[in-house]
Image (tube, helix red, strand yellow):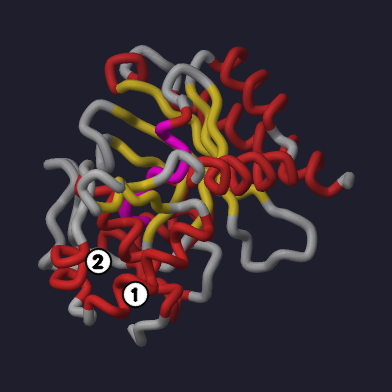
Amino acid sequence: MKQTPLTQGITLVRMMVHAGHSLGVTRIAEELEMPKSSVHRLLASLQDLGFVQKIEATKRYTLSADIFDFVHEIAWHFGRNLRLDDQLRAAAAKLDCSVYINMLGRRDTYVVCAAGGEGNTTRLGSHGRAYASSGGKVLVAQLPEKEWARYAPHNDEVPATRYTSRDPEKFFARLREARQTGFAWNRRETSKDHVSVAAVVREPFIDPPRLAVALLMRHEVFAVRDQAELENELLKLAGELERELGSR
């Protein structure tokens, strides 16, 4: 990927998130393979944006609390634009499980809205490979088959759990099933403790679809639930959400 000030800034913010402590200019320059003069300019820009703050006593840099204003703005306005919060909360209470809205990225699926016991704020933005995600499978299934290979597992990827399959042909088979049934399952493939089932939620004027709704529960809870009932309730919920989005 070609490096630009924007990509370098994002890389630096991610570095600070993962570091968990303040960083000095020398360390940043080494990690980013940039001259110190360029690092100083990059840090100044990030300070102007309110993403980074300088600790004057140590001359080191760390994330600023003001960055959460930006994070909140994205999460709040995107969720508000979807305006599905009430429906998700009601569904989570009715079905006694967590309900997620997932979005398909380049190879991962991301949680963009959530409700229920497993739907706390730390889930927003959480993501995993599409091939191991119920939402990812059902969304990839909507794409032309020639694009499926881009989302297929690679042999060199570390599986998230011992239940995660890295067999591309098995992945393609699951996609064909999802096309026929309208839903896809994730049986402990992303987390050994959880099971989920997802269906596509279509928005007006957006094709192929980018959103899926998923019902998620712990494995021990799923063991005593009726699978067919969950599938039917999921498809009903997806239809309700589509009608809500289409009525605006």
Image coords of residue 107 (percent x, y): 37, 64
Image coords of residue 45 (percent x, y): 46, 67
Q: Are marks 1 and 2 in contact (CB under 8 Å)?
A: yes
**Going from the N terminus, do you reach mark 1 or mark 2 first?**
1
The residue indicated by pointer 1 is 149
Amino acid on which the number 2 mark rests in the picture: Pro
Q: Which element carries disc 2, helix, strand or loop? A: helix
Residue 126 sits inside the magenta stretch = yes
For residue 1, the mark is: none
- In the image as oriented, which residue stretches furthest toward the bottom? 2
Q: Nearer the viewer, residue 187 or 91?
A: 91
Q: Nearer the viewer, residue 125 or 231?
A: 125
Image coords of residue 101 (percent x, y): 56, 41
Quadrant in the rendering for residue 150? bottom left
Q: Which residues are magenta?
A: 122-133
- In the image as oriented, which residue stretches furthest toward the front? 57
Quadrant in the rendering for residue 93? top right
Quadrant in the rendering for residue 77? top right
For this view, does 174 lie left or right of residue 20?
right
The residue indicated by pointer 2 is 168
